[in-house]
Amino acid sequence: MATIAELENIAWQIRRDIIRMVNGASSGHPGGSLGCADLMTALYFEVLDLEPKNFTMEGVGEDMFFLSNGHISPVWYSVLARRGFFPIKELSTFRVLGSALQGHPTPKYSLPGVRVASGSLGQGLSVSIGASLGKKLNGCNHLVYTLCGDGELQEGQIWEAIMFAGSNKIDNLITIIDRNNAQIDGEVDNVCSLSNLKAKFLAFDWDVVQMEGNDMKDCIRGLKEAKQLTGKGKPVAIIMNTLMGYGVDFMQGSYKWHGVAPNTEQTANALSQLKETLGDY
């Protein structure tokens, strides 16, 4: 079991990877990736019950994770590599034509850790529900986790899935909402407000946990609280408050860094603010 300080150090290195990957490709989505670095570190290095070397597409006998907001692939790729799913040096191939590390995750190249394509927003929760039902049918007691963006919740399919999961008491599912209030066109509340998310999930018969996604200690607390609520007849939603671009002052809190790559000068500035704790790839 890692300490909070050890997990924080991993998250700082993940952020360095994100900046270098997106700059190297001159393309990608740094904002949401930086904001979710603590969560993804907490999941893969502390919470998820899985073994990288035993990865299978079916996920039998282990927890499963699905990234619905697939554009924040840099944070997922970095975490998967640092956790041992594939060599860390492969991060240098991000968005290279023919690389397994495409801008949006795809199973086409059999990249360990990736089970479905998640380039189209709104679909990941439905996939996760299918996986959750599959585990129930197979008598597997492990859990299914999914991460969705808050802007993604403007998709109608998401609400059909939320309704279905609550109605069918899919209680081996934990869905995390990255509530950073930022999407490509502006602030979520200005584009299409989601209003009171907690009240909405409760109305659809889910249990709800709230946590601060840029506080490692609270991430661990929230994820463990959510896990304790599973198996009780309701799916579980975690509403996670984050800042887009967290850790880099000129990106932090700005929707303008949703999908823009930093130039050479901006990259140097960003890296000067992010501790190198595990060694760069």
Image (tube, rainbow, N blue to C red):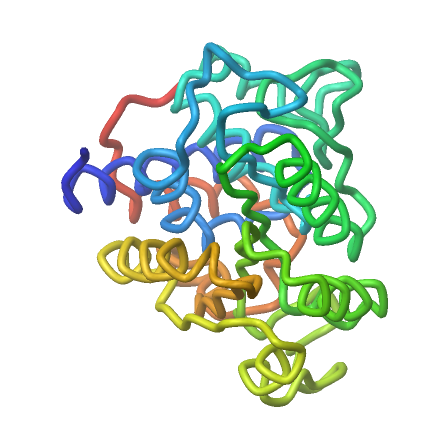
Relative to 95, is 88 on the left or the right?
A: left
Question: Is residue 90 placed above or below 39 in the rendered structure?
Answer: above
Q: Position of residue 58 (x, y in %)?
A: 66, 23
Question: Is residue 172 placed above or below 164 in the rendered structure?
Answer: above
Q: Quadrant of the N terminus?
A: top left
Relative to 39, is 204 on the left or the right?
A: right
Camera-nearest residue between 8 and 143: 143
Q: Position of residue 244 (x, y in %)?
A: 50, 63
Q: Quadrant of the C terminus?
A: top left
Question: Is residue 154 placed above or below 34 in the rendered structure?
Answer: below
* Residue at 67% from the left image edge and 52% from the top image edge: 259
* Residue at 39% from the left image edge and 23% from the top image edge: 83
Camera-nearest residue between 115 and 213: 115
* Residue at 58% from the left image edge and 28% from the top image edge: 24
Camera-nearest residue between 30 and 55: 55
Q: Position of residue 94 (x, y in %)?
A: 63, 25
Relative to 31, is 168 on the left or the right?
A: right
Q: Quadrant of residue 181?
A: bottom right
Camera-nearest residue between 246 and 221: 221
How many marks do you count on the picture? 0
* Residue at 42% from the left image edge and 47% from the top image edge: 37
Q: Position of residue 66 (x, y in %)?
A: 62, 41
